[in-house]
Image (cartoon, rainbow, N blue to C red):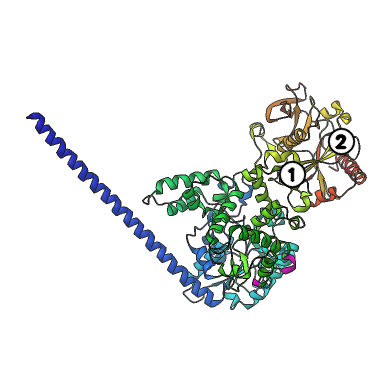
Amino acid sequence: MNSILTAFQSLAAAGWIKVALGIVAGLIGLAASAFSLRAGLINLQRQKQAKLIQDQALWSGTVSDFTKEDITASLKHYVVPDCSQTDPANSSDIRRAAGVREPVIRTVDRFITNSENRHLLVLADTGMGKTSFCLNYLAHRNRLNKGEGALSCAVIPLGRPDALEKIRRVPNPADTILLLDAFDEDVRAIDNSDERLSQLLNQAAEFGTVIITCRSQFFKNDLAIPSRTGVAIVRPRRAGISSEYVLETLYLLPFTPKQIKQYINRQFPWWSWGGLAGSKMARTLTENVPELSVRPMLLALLPDLVREGRQIQELFDLYQFMTAKWLDREASWIEPSILTAVSKRLAVFIYASRGRRGSDRVTVDELHSLAQAMDIPEDRWNHLSARSLLNRDSEGNIKFSHRSIMEFYFVLSAIDGDPACFKVFWSDFMRELFVSWGNSQQGQSNVVRAKQILAMDLNKLGLSPLSEPLDGPQDYSVRTFINSRASRQRRIADAWRADSIKILSAPNQIHRVIEDAEFGLIWEVPHLSDYDTDEIQIIQTTHVEMIKTGMSKRLASKVQFLALLEAEASLDMELLMRETFLWLGDRIGKRSPIVVSVSDAPLEHSGVKLLGQLSGKDRNGTPVWAYEVLTQPTGFGSRVAVVSAIPTLVSETDRQSRQKLHSMSPEELRSFLDGLNHEQKSLTAEPDSAS
């Protein structure tokens, strides 16, 4: 009887458990339905808001260069990026760029309201949302534009030849915020940026605020970023205020982990089928592929990448994936192979002729002519849609949906061997794509083609330096000097390294000139027989800038020295003398110089103190040791001549200087180097009072 009673109790308990589980499942389903309904309502609200903004903007003519589809794509799912006055490219990991950051729309609002100036330059890398910022800021101002005195906005892309005329046609400039988008795509700016900027700002002098967006790499360094506008301040000024407006600078920053998480949660809500698994894979992808977080345009690929289970790590592969999805969407009206061929031909045509045509768009007739030359019927282009990476603008001209898409197809054409690609100067993003291709599986299987391109004059093409430049000499603490690494992003493929090193010339038996195209370095390296060991051990020189020649010849930093050691291995020749001290330009603190040796064991010398072993080794596995110089040689920094036997940098990341050296004959190069040595010795031999 007891066993029967126990059985009934067990059945009852099981029933209650099922009921409880059913209630929990129902509640979860109800919560999921509520979240889904809420997401749907938010999406409908955004679409309605976008349509209202489009109608207002298009009716007023303030964004006439953009179609409704362009505006919808920019407004939908927009995550407001942060900004800073610090360039994120100066951070070793651009995804974790330091500095004070806040939402860019809030910052620009405050600039317009409070700043003494009214000109702002917004810089960002490719695909970081400069155009999306312009359109979303216009939307933001439209929402605010309800009371008297409210400011309107106008957005004008500078990649068109009639930009000045469009600026002139904007009504009520004093009450308008003018957003000039993509200064780097202005052909006249490419030829002479200072003159073109002055022209644009003078034409826009009557506008209340002028905001210009531009790729950050358009300017070769921070010193090249313009700060003067040439526009006079006509109102009364406080003491100390300039007589002209200053061009202030902001940088768009990569998404923070929190912002990326927000975006991923929108794309993969936890309550959706497979949402948790998709969210986890998406987070893994953004951690492994920095371009996904650095470039919001590529972040939009996450849903397709997760859906297909793709594990992509290269920028080149991301663009290949993006364009492949486009080819699939358009396959119903044109074969993918034909669309690819035309896109590559069109990309080269647009980029190579941009100076003559002054635009990054072509007319329908020009597209037809190009297609006919490839035996493709005209009617194939009647189906171009807003979802296409190749589409029509508001005037019916054909354009790539983003400049980086055009640059990707240009690089594909170059890899295919189109000779027109090697008659023009490549953009910085083309260089990034080319290097990324070398690291991709496709590039690794086509090293022969890569070597053919690397054998060309990379300076003339704009491909040197292939990787990010190395840090120059700095002042370190002992621990930091030993442990610090090169702060750069990705390097070229290992199979490319030997081809990036060249003996530029051997002007005589004593000196050789070595070019390292990966880092944009040119070295003067003496022949081993020219070394005087005793002299090297006691002589040091300060950095001497060769103002008269426009070049510098100085000692290398630690990371640059290790790059020369790599070059030695790639050339399979001994450039650096072993078992002796070689000077670096780095210092411990602000006084003590540093020497290194390539030797099996640390060298003993009363004038130096061992700091430790560096991370690099030579091709035979011989370690590199670093030492602090404890006692300064007599006449240090004032009367001591430069020792020509020490490897020194003749040119560093200065493309014009490298091109100048390339054009010299062996005799001219020998004379030039002798002149540098003579001038440097004269400068360092000045009396103490002069120094």
Residue 483: x and y in percent read 64, 33
Amino acid type at circle 1 is Lys
Task: Judge the density around disc 1: few (<14), some (14-19), many (≥20) Cα neighbours within 10 Å.
Answer: some
Vertical relation: 421 (above or below) 160: above
Instruction: Tell me the residue at 72%/69% (across/down).
Output: 357
Residue highlighted by disc 2: 644
Nearest the viewer among 249 and 405 is 405
Name the image quarter holding the N terminus: top left
Q: Secondary structure at mark 2?
A: loop
For marks 1 and 2 on the same chain, the one whose residue lies earlier in the sequence: 1
Q: Quadrant of residue 152?
A: bottom right
Name the image quarter holding the C terminus: top right
**Total of numbered circles in the picture?**
2
Q: CA distance from mark 1 to mark 2?
A: 33 Å
Instruction: Tell me the residue at 57%/45% (across/down).
Output: 313
Q: Nearer the viewer, mark 1 or mark 2?
A: 1
Vertical relation: 512 (above or below) 111: above
Amino acid type at circle 2 is Ser
Check residue 28 in the rendering and tell me which mark sits there, or answer none. none
Vertical relation: 598 (above or below) 138: above
Using residue 297 as the reference point, say whether residue 206 is left or right of it: right
Residue highlighted by disc 1: 451
Looking at the rendering, the stretch of residues picked out in magenta corresponds to: 354-364
As for residue 297 lying within the magenta part, the answer is: no
Vertical relation: 104 (above or below) 504: below
